[in-house]
Amino acid sequence: MYGRKSKDRYFADKAPSTPPAKANGAGSPEDAHATNTPGGSMFGRFTSGLRRGTKSFDEGGVDARTGKKITKRALARAKGVYIPPSVEEAMEHRDETHPRVQGQRGLEVYPLNIGIGDLGVEMGPGIALYFFFLQWMGGMFFVLFFINLPTVLVANAAKYYGPHSASRNSTGYQASWTNALAGEFDFASTTLGSIAPDDVDEDDWLVYRGLFSIHVKKVDFLFGCAGADLVGVFLFFVVMFFLQRRQNAIVAAVDEDSIEISDYSVTVKGLPEDATDKEEVRCFFELKFGKVVDAVLARNDGVLLALFKNRSVLAMRKDELHAKHVKRGTKHTARAMEKITRKIEIMDDEIEKLKSKRNFKTKLAFVTFSDEESLLDCLQASPRTWLGQYLMPEEEKFRGTHAYTVQQAPAPTDVMFENLDVSPRSRFFRRLVIVLVTCLLLVVSFAAITAISVVKAKLSLSTAMDPRKLALAIGGPGGGVYGTAESKALRSVDPLAVVLTQDFNGTTAFRAVCETQLSLCESAYSEAGVLTVMPWGTPLTVFSVVDPMSASERRIKGKTLMGEIEMCGEDETLCTESRRPAVLATQTCHACYCAGLKYKRWDEHGETHVMGDLAIDSYSDLEIAEIREQCDVFLQEPGEFQNVLLLVAVLAVTVVNSGLKVVIKSISFFECPVSFIELQKNVAEKVFVAQFFNTAVSSLVINAALPELVKGVPILDGTVFSGTYRDFDQAWYQAIGGPLMVTMLVNTIGPVGGNLFTEWFGSVNRFVGRATAWTQHSLDEAYLGPEFDIATRYGEVLMCVMVTMMYGSGMPLLYAFACFFCVTIAYCDKRHLLRVCRRPPRYGTSLAYFALQVVPYAGLVHLLVGMWMHTHFVTPRVGYATGPDTNSALLGDDAYVSALRESTRNAFANALATGATLGDILAIARNASSREAASRGIGYAPIPDEINRRILQANGFPFFLCALFFVAGSVAYKVLTTFWNTFKACAPCFTTLPCLRKDLTFEGVPAFEHAFMTDKLVGAHTYEMRELPKYKDFFFESKTPGATPQKKRQVDERSFRGENDERRGYASDSSDSSDSDTMGNIGAALRAV
């Protein structure tokens, strides 16, 4: 039934204009009348001939205006008899309004496996291109994930948590893949942040022994990651190129396999504002180019349409009240009917006054030709630019004085008639206001996300420890000496059963016991050449006495020791045999260490504190995060309110994005565009920008430590770029990257959950409607599904693509999430469209081409951010990358390192020979690492120098070069395109040259009359506003008898249709005009015959 080839659908496209006669020698009545109309309006004379041989529409229960049969319910309502609304009629109305296809047993739902081409034929190219875009994006992200899968696997295994050893493989690949992948998994462990930092000396970094052996150095692995990333970017741009070609092919195929009224119609602009007679317009174009089926004049009467819309709401409410009154007959409903009747009368007076005072002007016209050849002649011969309009000869002008322009007409459902009265200047200022409001919304959402992030940080960095847990671990069952007599008597090991004494003070109570205990712990957990320092109230520190130890190696060694201290405190059998005797006397090390961090107070004033303050209050966020990890077992359990706040903080971005989506859709109508697809495009743009800013940019700006960028700038200084992360290091991936991946995964649940909720709400609405609806119109509305919201979905998909490409270099698992998002949304949206939603308007290609304009810039963002992520790890410069020894460019000369170690040993030997104190030894140990001392002396590198370093690195230069080529190519293409369009506008005569002329495609569609009468037309069949589904309820007339005298109601209808509709180009009720029939009249006439 759908998706047939064009030659099958248009079997009569090569036939003559007059169909052949039947076997008995007589053609059909329709064909006979059609051949007897050599000129003039086909529909007028055609239906006039039919009218002379048939009964009046008013006879036999047929509505004269719409051509539809009057139902028994409407006839009963006219007599004042109430008939309850019918569920069967509501379901029939739903089948007419929802996507349905004619099956063997009537209308049936479309199959979910309907192809892209068939979907485009049935619902327009815009819908087909949307699902095609999702399919290609899903496939592309799957390929990108597959290319970067080795990076994910190695990164997940690369957890350098083991003890410091110059010969140890720090990645975790020690013997086999099984042991490597047996570590703890989290999202951050799949990122580049889990790779060992640069200050860890490595040689054979990646080792695999199995069917074969692999020995890869770290720098080679980094080059491999960057190479795989570049291959993925190249494939991304290739896919974008072929995606555009394929979309163009789909649009051409859909246009070939479907017939719309826009295939016969043109939009005419520049007509005089007083051109109120559509017959004049029709005859003008018919005499010049060929037979014209209809000409519809669109006017700037948006204010009048708004009044009619409000009046229709009152009329619907009046019908509801009348139904209740007929059924119940209460005085309350009678008074309510009188009240609403007065409102309708007041509204009618306003309409009449507006119609009498204002002369609505013609803004444009839609001219529908009978055949495609006339359409192409009109497009070829008429000007399309302002210069062509200016140079138009007088004999070609309308009325000899008015030059005009023509364009291929859009689909009727794409025209927003209510916005034609808005001037371009007013629309410009409206657009400016919308932009300002959108920016304000972004600022508000940024402030909200920042505030929520601060709350989340405070909750996640809380160091509140439970003193009962500490007392139980240090004092023993029941809290020991820290508990009350009753608590000690119970000897409970449950912290909730421990009751501390009233004069308990952790600073004084724990310190007396723990200072001595911590001194024993330092001796127990020190090794040959490595000192462990953990005095009361000081974070654990590890110092290398002989060999230099980098900051990363010290942190890793400290993490290993703390894990061992915690295990030995729980069970001494878990300790190594060499430490087991000393550990028996130091089992409270872990509890004393955490108690000291919690309760230590400063004994003197300092730059960041005053005497008596808790020491932990002056620690940095990174230090507090490390303390929370070390003392996790003693932290207080968060309350219900704190858990709710943490949940809100995790879902903050998704919640804010959902709210912005609703607000942006609401305010976009204020712009008043003349095209529905333009409105959808504006919504998609704003949703994409807002959600991308909140999801990807805000977290980067809030947490980045780049204060020099906004130094001295009001408001921004101290607000943005004042975070704690200078680079994409391990801490950034742990605190920001991991939650961002969770957010992207949750973003998939939001649209799917929205579709399911809408479907569930529709079933509830139908159930409630069956019990509460008083009129058939109300029940019909309850059975209708929602509109398919393609605009906001495009914005969400583009946000997903941009965020994924932005951070995909460092977090390749995002490619898998994006693939899952596209595949899931494609299936769920197709099901939602074909099973739940109303039939959408026939969307054009603007949204699809807008997406194609945005997506390539995701590749540019990927190149720039990817360069910064990859160059976090230092590699040789471009000039040294092909040298014989790349390690020398990274680690320095071995002789220099040996000399450094020898000088460190000499310093220790001299200090010990002269009677050095522990402080002297620790001072030497703190400066043993040359890189750590250099980093402390240098601090943050200036941003220009850092950019220069990263660009010239071997794993960063290719990204920068590709980005440079992309920018240069985009600028050149934009300049050349602008120049060519300007040249064609200024010199249109050159475009008529054979070498430059672009011929219009002749599709071979049949005549409009044949396509209309054989039901080959898809979509709307007319540009008459009354016949379009969107405006059907604008002119709803109450069927309540007696509320308004029948005679007066007929006069009002005749007045509206005679005085206003005729000027707009709608059908007139006058019997003199032979060209006054609408599509409804023609269809009814054909059925009557």
Image: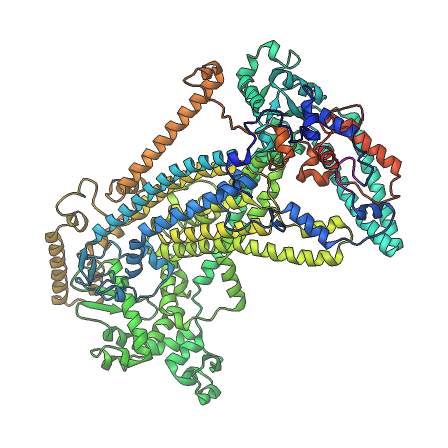
Magenta highlight: main SS: loop
**1063 to the left or right of 575:** right
Q: Which residue lies most toward the bottom here?
A: 489
Q: Quadrant of the N terminus?
A: top right
- 883 part of magenta stretch: no
Q: Residue at x 46, y 43 (%)?
A: 132
Q: Residue extending furthest front?
A: 24
- Residue 857, percent from left and from top: 40, 38
Count of marks placed on residues: 0
Give whichever of 678, 194 is nearer the camera: 678
Image quadrant where residue 25 sits:
top right
In the picture, measured across the screen, residue 1025 lies left or right of residue 627, that is right
Q: Which residues are magenta?
A: 62-69
Chosen colour scheme = rainbow
Q: Can residue 690 be seen here?
A: no
Determine whether 748 is above or below 538 in the image.
Answer: above
Name the spot of residue 937 as percent of width and height, x first.
25, 50
User: In this rendering, would 282 be left or right of 1071?
Assistant: left
Q: Position of residue 228 (x, y in %)?
A: 28, 47
Front residue of 231 and 105: 105
Position of 637 relative to 245 (above/below): below
Q: Quarter of the image containing the C terminus?
A: top right
Write the residue at 56% across / 18% down. 382
65 drawn magenta? yes
